[in-house]
Image (spheres, rainbow, N blue to C red):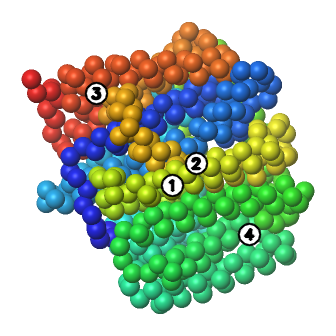
Amino acid sequence: MTETQAPASTSRIDALDVLRGFALVGICLVNVEFFNRPVAQSGAGMPPGLQGLDWLVAWVVAYFFSGKFWTIFSLLFGMGFALMLERARLANRPFLPAYLRRIGALLVFGLLHYCLLWSGDILISYAIGALFLLLTLFTRGRWLLAAILGCMALSLLPAPWRTLGGLALPLGFVGLVALYLRGKPDKAGFALAMFLPGALILIAALLQFLLDAGDALMLAVAGGVLVGLGWLALRHGGTGTGRLWRAGIAIYVLTFGLVTAEGGLRYLSPGAAALGPAAATAIDGREVDADVARGLRHRELVQRSAQERRVLTQGSYADAVAMRISHLGERLRDEAGFSVILVGVFLIGAWCVQSGMAANPAPWQALLRRLAWIGLPLGIGLGLAGSLIATGRPPGVDDQGYDFAYGLLALGSLPASVGYMAALLLLLPRWPVLARVFAPLGRMALSNYLLQSIVLSLLFYGYGAGLWGMGRAAQSGVALALCGVQACASAWWLARYRYGPAEWLWRAVTYLRLPQNTTKP
């Protein structure tokens, strides 16, 4: 781990609870739609046919909330990681065993939440992302290299072993970031070691594209990572916590920048596919043309959406659980790529703690103001610019520019999230009511997140009240009302107990002892 310049306080940081509660409200406003719409359509933008107030609410949520609040939660998750690491260091106790138990417990929470309640779960992603973060910060180089080479070898074998080969690229990302974070102050030598292979890979990607010889996107990703990290090392070499946020931003911007570029290429050059008009893509172990691949994925999306809608509106609870379990393997296969993005966001959150900003925001007021005034217009503006191209994925194979628009929206989510957090931190001293509203929600974030899924599934699914299809404005009203009730209930609970029910269990597994949960008289 990089050196710590300003240790964080080991006491609970109340501002983080406020931010966590604020994020929970935003997440509920976004998630409620997918208790009335197939989760398979998440990321597909606004549904067609909305009018009046329903359209307005859907538009506001899509461009001011979607993508922003899971990013805030991810930043806070990275802060929690750094806080736990610092507390373990100050207490002179081992960090990794406890944190591995914490990740394992979170994965169990996520699997149960996914299978029993809702397939839009984010806890599985956080658990896998946290494991990748540990690999980035703690794994020895030779073991990481062995894992990468092993996954590359598996990719040459027939299915199902080939599926494990898909981990090679994410592990490669992790390895490059680990090299950057642990690099010696000899910045010129490290930069050269990144630049040379990166430039060669980018040239290979360009040749692939010009010759229509295959999928150039993955080569462009790998080459871009190498060149980007080399530039960072040359421009900002040495040691220190600044490497955390630079690496995190590089991962995020590069990933969604390439998504945007690929979508923009197809939108501006009709017929182009995946950075190469005749690019080949693997589907179920078969090499197929990229246009065919998009057609197959579209057909699978239509079938999955129809199945979700049928089971969740007409089926029993057992039918819903069986459907989610049948989709679990595919969900886990998709997690590796998303976990790379999460690692980037986690690293930025860890920097907020290691720099001292999370524990003592006062000296950082000028930076917070810049983040708010620049991050919010930039982040939201990118999404709104995309909305001029498309607000939702149209039916059929041709996305009609939606992938380009979605890439812009995703690129803007990080600056917008940072802007929201900075603005809230600036407002807290002036509006203490914000702490009274959001802090109890944030202290019981895991319990409240799980409870939201219980309540919303019982309201909207066929085995409950069967209100599936409620208008978008009414859905948001339900979400806000639920968060209001949870804020009051959380304040009542925390006046009597130190932890929420899920938080108490999570802590017990992490530290292998039952926490004292009653408040002092």
Q: Which label's residue is closer to the chain start, 3 or 1?
A: 1
Viewer-proximal residue, 39 or 5?
5
The x, y position of residue 446, in whole percent, is 37, 33
Q: Nearer the viewer, mark 3 or mark 4?
A: 3
Quarter holding the C terminus? top left
Tell me which amino acid carries mark 1. Leu
Q: Which label's residue is closer to the chain start, 3 or 4?
A: 4
Q: Quadrant of residue 24?
A: top left
Relative to residue 77, is residue 87 drawn left or right? left
Q: Quadrant of residue 46?
A: top right
Q: Which residue is mark 1?
A: 371
Q: Who's the residue at 24% across and 61% down the image? A: 7
Q: Which residue is mark 2?
A: 376
How far apart are labels 3 and 4 at the CA level? 49 Å
143 to 476, vertically: above or below? below
- As drawn, the label of residue 501 is 3
Mark 2, other Cα within 10 Å: few <14 / some 14–19 / many ≥20: many
* Local secondary structure at mark 1: helix
